[in-house]
């Protein structure tokens, strides 16, 4: 029997927390480098601020009683804060489930119930659907948080859970140490199928699943200095393709990423022109 092997060498997959892997920074990128840019508002966030806000979000979740194995649902279009809200639960051993931003309230309710999500972070434009979906599964409306920095009709921004900006790292919740088998067995994400054969089905991805895919992609780039490039994020971040390309591989390789909320030909071409 002929065994076909890759022309690329075997990769050593770090058996660690996916957040720890993402920030391992093999290119020694300084904290001052801008990691994410909103294509519309031009809001920027540096690598250092991004890491600090993830730890602050994890601390905020902890203070809400969120614990290892609990689930946060993200129901939003692409935006700068998406990666912060995705990684925050992972820091403390929680799970993030990403929801298709085109879902109806019934579809959202199915994912909330199936995943066991206890907190929703949503975009203001999707708030009414989030409220209806939460009601269908009996989730308290005070467990719905908003992206952005403003309160709306009693719904608070997710950043309202943050400890003060100047809180030292030593006073933020520590990154959960997941070594070896624990990293292989601990669920990090629950992404959902398209539902073409019935209701969408959850796919559990462990921390090592996320790490391994980034390691598999990296050798394909050869000698290209990826950390010197700018990427345009048009892939939906609720989808595993967008998560891996922009939020795992992109961060790990220190790629500056410009984020489009939604795809439109005009915005796509204008953003290329502006940031090429």
Image (cartoon, rainbow, N blue to C red):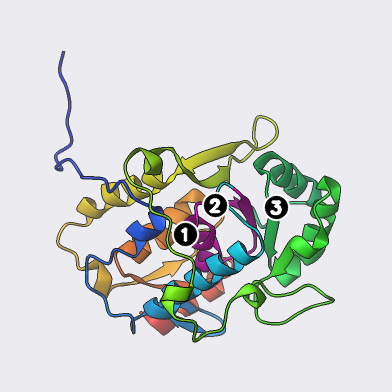
Residue with the mark numbered 3? 118
Q: Say which residue appears at 84% left-offset and 76% top-offset.
A: 153
Tell me whether circle 2 and circle 1 mark residues in contact (CB < 8 Å).
yes
Quadrant of the image occupied by residue 193: top right
Left or right: where 215 falls relative to 121? left
Q: Is residue 154 shown above or below 119?
A: below
The residue pinned by badge 1 equals: 91
Marks 3 and 1, Cα distance to the nearest angstrom? Answer: 17 Å
Q: Earlier in the sequence, mark 3 or mark 1?
A: 1
Q: Is residue 75 magenta?
A: yes
Q: Is residue 31 magenta?
A: no
Give the answer, above or below, for where 188 lies relative to 123: above
Whether residue 198 is visible here, answered yes or no, is yes
Q: Quadrant of residue 155?
A: bottom right
Tag 2 residue = 94
Identity of the residue drawn at 31% across and 46% down = 15
* Residues rendered magenta in the picture: 70-99
Percent x, y of residue 156: 74, 74
Q: Quadrant of the C terminus?
A: bottom left
Query: Of marks 3 and 2, which one's residue comes earlier in the chain?
Result: 2
Q: Nearer the viewer, residue 96 or 174?
A: 174
């Amino acid at each position: 029997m002929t065994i076909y092997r890759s022309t690329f060498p075997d990769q050593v997959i770090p058996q660690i927390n996916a957040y720890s892997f993402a920030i391992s920074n093999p290119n020694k990128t300084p904290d001052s480098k801008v990691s994410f840019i909103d294509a519309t508002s031009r809001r920027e966030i540096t690598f250092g601020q991004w890491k600090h806000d993830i730890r602050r979000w994890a601390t905020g979740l902890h203070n809400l009683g969120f614990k290892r194995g609990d689930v946060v649902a993200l129901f939003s279009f692409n935006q700068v804060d998406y990666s912060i809200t995705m990684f925050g639960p992972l820091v403390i051993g929680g799970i993030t489930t990403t929801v298709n931003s085109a879902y109806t309230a019934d579809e959202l309710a199915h994912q909330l119930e199936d995943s066991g999500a206890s907190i929703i972070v949503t975009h203001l434009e999707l708030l009414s659907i989030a409220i209806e979906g939460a009601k269908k599964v009996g989730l308290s409306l005070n467990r719905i948080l908003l992206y952005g920095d403003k309160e709306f009709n009693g719904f608070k921004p997710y950043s309202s859970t943050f400890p003060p900006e100047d809180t030292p790292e030593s006073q933020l919740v520590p990154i959960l140490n997941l070594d070896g088998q624990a990293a292989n067995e601990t669920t990090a994400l629950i992404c959902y199928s398209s539902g073409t054969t019935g209701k969408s089905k959850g796919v559990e991805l462990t921390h090592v699943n996320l790490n391994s895919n980034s390691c598999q992609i990296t050798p394909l780039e050869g000698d290209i200095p990826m950390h010197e490039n700018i990427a345009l994020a048009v892939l939906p971040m609720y989808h595993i393709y967008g998560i891996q390309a922009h939020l795992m591989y992109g961060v790990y390789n220190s790629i500056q990423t410009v984020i489009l909320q939604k795809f439109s030909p005009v915005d796509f071409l204008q953003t290329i022109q502006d940031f090429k």
